[in-house]
Image: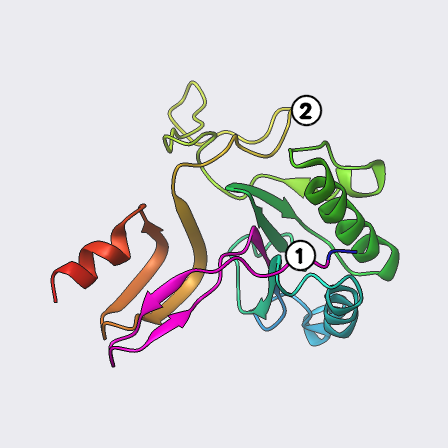
């Protein structure tokens, strides 16, 4: 279990007040209300949202890794998908339908938090791991086959890219409003370091 305190990150709101927005090591994003994941009427198994939240609370991860159970993450043919962003690295998993697998996901997360580095997934998770992005590194380099198309993960290869220099969020449908009143729409959103500071300086 983690009892780490939330790292201070003082940010000035639009009303001028300074608030502590916190700085966490990552986020676990679970597709729970998308177009396919959890839809039993379409033949998919339910998403155990209560278990995700219970394990997150039980392990006291609130100040370390944020839990977001929301809409579609994109790889719909796989269903019941979750993406872990940890220390600038992405970890994708599909078919997370049962208690032991979700508990194993949290065990894996805590093992990497304790080690302070990337670890290979345990056998119970290895079959669920994949790469949901079209790039394989911090420079955003696409993985392409000889025909010019995006190629899949090679058998036995690490499905997770190295540490990223930017944070990317992939959603099937995104409507996000920042505290500056800007609206962003699209499938891929990229925020480079200093992005929010540049906006603030321009006010």
Numbered circles on residues, count:
2
Residue 43: x, y in percent? 73, 67
How far is disc 2 from disc 1 in space, using C-alphas?
37 Å
Residue 175: x, y in percent? 35, 71
* Residue 99 lies in quadrant: bottom right
Q: Nearer the viewer, residue 115 or 35?
A: 115
Label ID, residue 4: 1
> Dot 1, how many residues are within 10 Å of its Cα: few (below 14), some (14-19), or many (20+)?
few
Q: Is residue 167 above or below residue 56?
A: above
Q: Is residue 164 left or right of residue 107?
A: left
Magenta residues?
3-28
Q: Nearer the viewer, residue 147 or 3?
A: 3
> Contact, CB < 8 Å: mark 2 with mark 1?
no
* Residue at the (68%, 51%) spot, across then down: 94
* Residue 170 lies in quadrant: bottom left
* Residue at the (56%, 50%) spot, across then down: 25
Magenta stretch, main secondary structure, is: loop
Residue ID for mark 2: 155
Residue 166 is at least partly visible in this image: yes
Q: Nearer the viewer, residue 67 or 172?
A: 67
Residue 101: x, y in percent? 82, 53
> Dot 2, how many residues are within 10 Å of its Cα: few (below 14), some (14-19), or many (20+)?
few
Quadrant location of the N terminus in the rendered image: bottom right
Q: Is residue 107 above or below residue 178?
A: above
* Residue at the (61%, 50%) spot, across then down: 84
Q: Is residue 136 above or below residue 76?
A: above
């Amino acid at each position: 279990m983690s009892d780490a305190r939330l790292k201070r990150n003082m940010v000035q709101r639009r009303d001028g007040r300074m608030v502590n927005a916190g700085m966490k090591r990552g986020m676990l994003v679970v597709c729970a209300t998308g177009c396919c994941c959890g839809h039993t009427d379409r033949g998919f198994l339910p998403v155990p949202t209560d278990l995700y939240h219970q394990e997150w609370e039980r392990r006291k991860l609130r100040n370390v890794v944020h839990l977001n159970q929301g809409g579609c993450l994109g790889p719909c043919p796989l269903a019941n998908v979750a993406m872990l962003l940890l220390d600038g690295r992405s970890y994708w998993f599909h078919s997370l339908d049962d208690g032991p697998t979700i508990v194993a996901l949290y065990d894996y997360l805590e093992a990497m938090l304790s080690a302070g580095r990337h670890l290979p997934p345990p056998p119970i998770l290895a079959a669920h791991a994949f790469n949901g992005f079209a790039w394989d590194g911090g420079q955003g380099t696409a993985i392409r086959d000889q025909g010019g198309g995006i190629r899949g993960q090679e058998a036995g290869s690490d499905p997770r890219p190295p540490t990223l220099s930017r944070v990317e969020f992939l959603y099937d449908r995104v409507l996000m409003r920042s505290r500056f009143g800007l609206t962003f729409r699209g499938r891929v959103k990229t925020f480079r370091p200093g992005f929010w500071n540049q906006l603030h300086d321009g006010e």
